[in-house]
Image: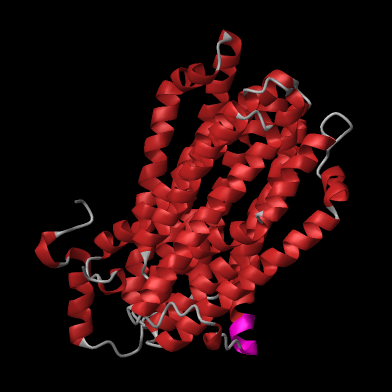
C-alpha cells in the first residue's frame, strides 16, 4: 500500500490518518467511562471520590509524555518531508529514551511525595487511603503510561498509523478487562483500578517496542531503538520541547478550567452537578472525535510543510476543518433531537433527565466550532509555531473561559455557566480563523511550475475517481 505521505488524493489521505486516530479517542472515552462504572459498583462514595480526585494527576503524567510525543511528532513529520530520514529516526530515538527517563523520575518523586500529592489533589480523612492506593499504582506505572501515550504520536508521525491505533486500542481493552477482574471479582477497589490502568499502558508499551524492533530489523531507519542512535543535540531538544510544552499545557489548563467550572456548577447543588456530568460525558464524543481527527492529520500537515508542498498542506487543513464542522453539526443535531433519550440511559428521575437533556443541547452547540479550533491548533503545532498554538490554548482555557464562566454566572446564573463553553468557543473560532488566514506559511511560492499546479489539482481527485464526497 502507498505510504500515507505519498497519497495523492487529499481526502483519502485525511481519512487514512484521521479515522484511526478518531477510533483511538473513542476507545479512550469508553475506558474512562468503564473505569468510573466499575469503581461505582463498590457502592462506596469514598472510592468514587478518590478516582475523581486522582484524575488531574493522571492527566498531568500523560501531559509530560505529550512534551516528547506531540513535540517529537511535529519535528519528525517535518524532517521526513524534508527527506531527512536519519535525523527523524534520531529524533524518535531521543523521544523514546527521554520518555523513559521522565517516567522513572516521575515514579521516584511520586512515591516519595505520595501523601502530600494526595492532599493537594483534595483528599480528606474519608478518602485519603483510597487516593493513596490509586496514586501508588499510577506512579509505579508512570514509565509505561508515558511511553504508551508518547508512542501513539511518534508512530503516527512515522507513518505507522495502523500500529499506532492498535497499540492504543490494545491498552484500553486490556484496561477494561482488568478493571472487571480486579474490581468486581477480586474486590481490590481503587488499587485495582489504578493497577488495571498501569498494566494496560504497560501492554501497549511492549507492543510498541516490539513494533520498533521489528521495523528496525526490516531496515526502517525511522525507528532505531538501539542506544547507539541516541545522539541528541541542543537544536533537536529545543525543537521537540518548544513544541511539546504548549501541547502539554493544553491538558493542564483544561484540567484547571474544568475545576473552575465544576466549582461554579456545584453552587447550584448536587442535581446540577449530576446533570452536567452526564451531559459532559455525552458531549465528549464529538469533542474527542474532533481531537482525534486533528491529531491524526497533524503529521500529514507537518510532512507537506517540510516538503514545501504548501497547496497540499492548505487543502489538508481546509478539508479537515470541513469534516470537523460536519461531524460536529451531525452530533449537535442528534443531541438536540434525542437528548432526553440519551439522558434516560443514565438516569431514572424525570426532572434530572429533562435538565440533563437541556444542558446537553447547550453544550453541543459548540461541537461544529471544534473542527476549526482543534485543526488550527494542530496546524500551528505541525509547523513548529509553538507561540501561536500556545496563544490558542491559553485563550481557550484561561483568558477567555475562566472570566467567561464568572461573568455569565453573574448575569444568568446556572444557564450562563453551562453556556460558557459555547460562547467562548464561538469567540475563539473567529480568532482562529483570523490567525490561520494571516499566517505567512500559507503564502504560495513565487514560482510555481505548471506541472506542480497540475499535480496539486490531481491531489483533490486522485487516481480512481476518489473525491471529497466519497
Q: Is residue 220 above or below residue 208?
A: below
Looking at the image, which is closer to me, 5 or 368?
A: 5
Q: With 245 as the anchor, is 287 left or right in this view?
A: left
Q: Which residues are magenta?
A: 233-238
Protein image colouring = secondary structure
Q: Position of residue 320 (x, y in %)?
A: 37, 57
Residue drawn at 41 percent across, 79 percent down? 222
Residue 410 percent across, percent down from the top left:
77, 32
Q: Quadrant of the N terminus?
A: bottom left
In reply to whether residue 441 is colored magenta, the answer given is no
Give the camera-side residue of 340 and 70.
70
Identified at 83% across, 44% down, the residue is 118
- Residue 395 visible in this rendered orientation of the protein: no
Quarter of the view holding residue 460: bottom left
User: Residue at coordinates 27% horizontally, 60% vertically from top-left?
Assistant: 11
Q: Position of residue 158 (x, y in %)?
A: 40, 72
Q: Residue furthest front?
A: 186
Amino acid at each position: 500500500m502507498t505510504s500515507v505521505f505519498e497519497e495523492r488524493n487529499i481526502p483519502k489521505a485525511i481519512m487514512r490518518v484521521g479515522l484511526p486516530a478518531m477510533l483511538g479517542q473513542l476507545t479512550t472515552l469508553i475506558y474512562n467511562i468503564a473505569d468510573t462504572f466499575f469503581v461505582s459498583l463498590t457502592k462506596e462514595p469514598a472510592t468514587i471520590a478518590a478516582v475523581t480526585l486522582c484524575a488531574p494527576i493522571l492527566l498531568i503524567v500523560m501531559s509530560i509524555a505529550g512534551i516528547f510525543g506531540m513535540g517529537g511528532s511535529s519535528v519528525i513529520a517535518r524532517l521526513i518531508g524534508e527527506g531527512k530520514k536519519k535525523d527523524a529516526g534520531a529524533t524518535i530515538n531521543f523521544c523514546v529514551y527521554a520518555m523513559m527517563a521522565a517516567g522513572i523520575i516521575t515514579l521516584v518523586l511520586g512515591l516519595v511525595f505520595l501523601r502530600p500529592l494526595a492532599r493537594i489533589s483534595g483528599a480528606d480523612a474519608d478518602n485519603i487511603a483510597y487516593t493513596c492506593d490509586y496514586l501508588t499504582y499510577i506512579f509505579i506505572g508512570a514509565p509505561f503510561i508515558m511511553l504508551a501515550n508518547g508512542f501513539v504520536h511518534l508512530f503516527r508521525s512515522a507513518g505507522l498509523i495502523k500500529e499506532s491505533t492498535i497499540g492504543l486500542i490494545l491498552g484500553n481493552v486490556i484496561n477494561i478487562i482488568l478493571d472487571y477482574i480486579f474490581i468486581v471479582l477480586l474486590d481490590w477497589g481503587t488499587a485495582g483500578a489504578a493497577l488495571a490502568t498501569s498494566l494496560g499502558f504497560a501492554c501497549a508499551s511492549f507492543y510498541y517496542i516490539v513494533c520498533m524492533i521489528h521495523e528496525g530489523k526490516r531496515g526502517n531507519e525511522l525507528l532505531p531503538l538501539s542506544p547507539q542512535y541516541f545522539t541528541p543535540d541542543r537544536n533537536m531538544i529545543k525543537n521537540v520541547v518548544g513544541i511539546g510544552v504548549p501541547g502539554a499545557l493544553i491538558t493542564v489548563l483544561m484540567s484547571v478550567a474544568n475545576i473552575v467550572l465544576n466549582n461554579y456548577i456545584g453552587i447550584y447543588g448536587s442535581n446540577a452537578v449530576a446533570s452536567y456530568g452526564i451531559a459532559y460525558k455525552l458531549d465528549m464524543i464529538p469533542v474527542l472525535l474532533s481531537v482525534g481527527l486533528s491529531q491524526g492529520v497533524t503529521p500529514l500537515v507537518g510532512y507537506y510543510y517540510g516538503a514545501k508542498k504548501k497547496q497540499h498542506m492548505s487543502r489538508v487543513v481546509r478539508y479537515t476543518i470541513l469534516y470537523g464542522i460536519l461531524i460536529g453539526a451531525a452530533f449537535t443535531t442528534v443531541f438536540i433531537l434525542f437528548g432526553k433519550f440519551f439522558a434516560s440511559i443514565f438516569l431514572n428521575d424525570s426532572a434530572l433527565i429533562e435538565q440533563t437533556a437541556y444542558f446537553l443541547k447547550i453544550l453541543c452547540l459548540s461541537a461544529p466550532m471544534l473542527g476549526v479550533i482543534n485543526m488550527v491548533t494542530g496546524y500551528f503545532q505541525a509547523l513548529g509555531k509553538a507561540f501561536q498554538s500556545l496563544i490558542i490554548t491559553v485563550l481557550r482555557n484561561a483568558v477567555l473561559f475562566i472570566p467567561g464562566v464568572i461573568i455569565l454566572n453573574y448575569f444568568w446564573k446556572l444557564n450562563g455557566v453551562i453556556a460558557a463553553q459555547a460562547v467562548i468557543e464561538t469567540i475563539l473560532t473567529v480568532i482562529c480563523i483570523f490567525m490561520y488566514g494571516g499566517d505567512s506559511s500559507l503564502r504560495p511560492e513565487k514560482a510555481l511550475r505548471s506541472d506542480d499546479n497540475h499535480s496539486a489539482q490531481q491531489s483533490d481527485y486522485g487516481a480512481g475517481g476518489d473525491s471529497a464526497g466519497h
